Image: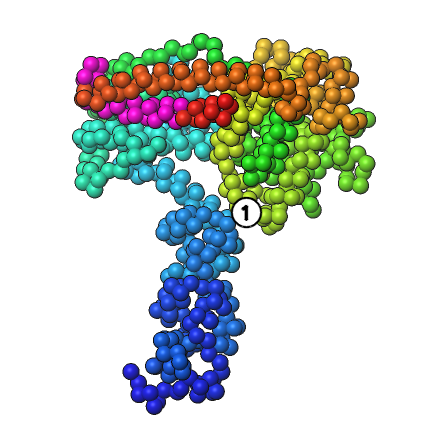
Amino acid sequence: MADNNSIPTFAEYEAKNGKLLNFEEFRKLHNMSRELVHELIEQGCFGDNLLRVGKDVQSRPLAYTAKYYFNADWAFNLKREDIGYTLKDIAEILDIPYSWLRDVSAKGYLDEGRLSRKLWNLEWFKGNLNKVRLESNNQKGKWRQSEFYDLLSKNQQQWIEKYLDRRKKGHGIRVGRKVEWTKPPAKLERTIEQWRKDLSIFFYKIICGRVGIPDYHLLERLGKYRPLTLEERTLFIEQRDCFKIIDFTPSDVDHIALGYKDTTFTRAVVEKHLTPFLYFVLNTLKEEWVGKKQQKLLGGTDCKITDDEVSLAKELYETFEMSIELSLSKVPKFAQNDEEDTRPAVYLTHEQILLAKNIIRSEKSFQEPVKRTLIFAFGSFVGIRPDEFANLRLENFVLDKDTKLLKRFVFDYSKKELVEVLPDNPSYSKGYGRLFITYNKGGYSPSHKEHGTLLVPKLTSLINSYLEEILYPKLPDAKGRGYFLRPNLKLSEVPYNARGVVQWLSSYSTENFTFLSAEERIYFKYYDVRHTVYNLIIKTPVDGISFEVRERAAQIHARHDIKKKAGNTGRKSYTEDISLEEYFTVIDQVLNFPWSLDEKFEDNFYTWAEQRNIIESRIPKSSTEESPEESISKAIELTQVKDSLLSELTKQLNVTEELANKLANGPSGDYKDVKKWTAKTIELDKEIKRLKREIKSVTSSREQTA
């Protein structure tokens, strides 16, 4: 330590250089934890503005425990942005999960925003968060897709790519005298990626089985096979060429089948993937044989192809053909289930749509009741599928270029077209919105390319309210672009998954849609609203409009058979599609009805319905209007249905647990084979957990009802 005589006293330093702040004063000034300040000191982040007691300045009188002081002028001018923020700070400020930030940081996605080992540039996060989210999700997907693919040899990868290339082009694959699989897959890139992953897993399982790696089929979690140990991975890579594709044998079917249920293996593995791939290989071998045979026959004395090569090519083809026959004969056969679905169909009436909408909108337990209401109303008036809903983008709507809200249109019967109405027009609130859905089921049911999909005026108003009051204020820079629905409103390029958008509705309707019967409430799900809108359009009479026109309007609106591929030849090829006027008239007469159920208002649903003679009976507008006897009766009815369901689930659980307990003693009976026994015990464990979850859910629901 330096001689105190050469170190200025506290008073001398302040007189010469200005006021000093102690550690606590500095920490509180910049809202930093003690741990963070100590870490920054150790990293030398403060430079000459940090003074160490005993080295740069003597102790302050009566403050002998202080170790550090800071230049006050510098401290007051210092911005927190210059120091940086911890990931926890950033997570709190931007309202994003800290665990996710920590995860993507460990993978290097945040390196550009790093200021020091533990401090980050907040402004960089604000400008790049969407990009980070998108890149990390994409890379995560690539990692999942390539995990098994990267373990394969070049030859094995080439077989996969040649097969996928043929499937992409839709050239078909010959099976006997027929050519099968002649259409390119829908959602091409996404589907091909999934097929590449699936085939890679099959090859992976074959190689593991051939080289003797045990329990390779066990799942670490849903959809994730257990990782290989270092020794197993080394063995796999060293011996992966033991599988040459053209030497596929019936035993390889057993290697692939481990871990799958019989039905899944037959339908999702063999019928969907393995059969077309094996016949593709067979056709390739036949082409090679025929090619060599032709060269031998036509090449004359200069031909380099030998008789042995031709014979070998023929033998490879014939052997592989026999292998396919024997392999596929081992696969369990399942007939299509022709039994009627025991689940009752639920079709809502016009009135029930409004009752459900009002119940959802007034639900106090929802954090975002407007968003939930929008999801239900959108499904009820558009019939959009969950996967389409999750991937719906603002760019799919016809938006005003300035406000980025939905434009409104009315139909001009003299021009036979939709014309835009502006906000100052008295008819503005009666204007329709327009939507052109592009991401859709199988890639074959987009919105009609001329008519689009019409959005009734009330739904258009609800959508604009959601955009103006909820979505755009959270992310003003992304107005008019990005996903329509987002798990995090601040991230415009991160979508829901299909289930995440609508899964809440089934359980919610069971408890709250009291206008439905007890059985209907138990089984109601989101897809019923798609069925509802289709049903209403077809069955609601419209003056001057035939059933055939209503049926086609329903197809266009719900985007079912848009390209008119179903039906007889006359309907498909010799009838003109309905006009925009006909489509608009049907939607306007069937779906453009008042949303108010209060008869005090002139513009109410009941007046509209009676004028069109489409209302059969009135349902109490509120469950509070039910008599005590009716409420008790409904509760008893719902409890009885739940008791029946609970009894059935309990029976299933008892049978499953009995078999699991029997197999717990080791391989026996139908499961003497160790591999089959292992697969069955895993399957039973999963089934027991599922049944217990369902029983717990129904029991809880029953107690609330009772």
Q: Which residue is drawn at 60% across and 23% down?
A: 558
Furthest-bottom residue in this view? 5
Magenta residue span = 668-695
Q: Residues within 10 Å of mark 1 (few under 14, many from 20)?
A: many
Hey, what amino acid is under mark 1? Lys
Label 1, secondary structure: give it.
loop
Q: Quadrant of the N terminus?
A: bottom left
483, 166: nearer the viewer: 483
- In this rendering, position of residue 200 left or right of residue 189: left
264, 531: nearer the viewer: 531
Is 370 in the magenta? Answer: no
- In this rendering, position of residue 120 left or right of residue 127: left
Q: Which residue is drawn at 64% across and 29% down?
A: 358
Count every numbered label the image shows and give the total: 1
Q: Can residue 481 be seen in this view?
A: yes
Quadrant assignment, res 370: top right
Quadrant assignment, res 345: top right
Q: Taking 577 as reference, is 27 above or below it?
A: below
Q: Which residue is drawn at 37% across and 65% down?
A: 39
Q: Residue at x 43, y 58 (%)?
A: 86
Quadrant assignment, res 611: top right
The residue that mark 1 highlights is: 490
Residue 80 in picture, x, y percent from top left? 49, 65
Most common secondary structure along the magenta stretch: helix
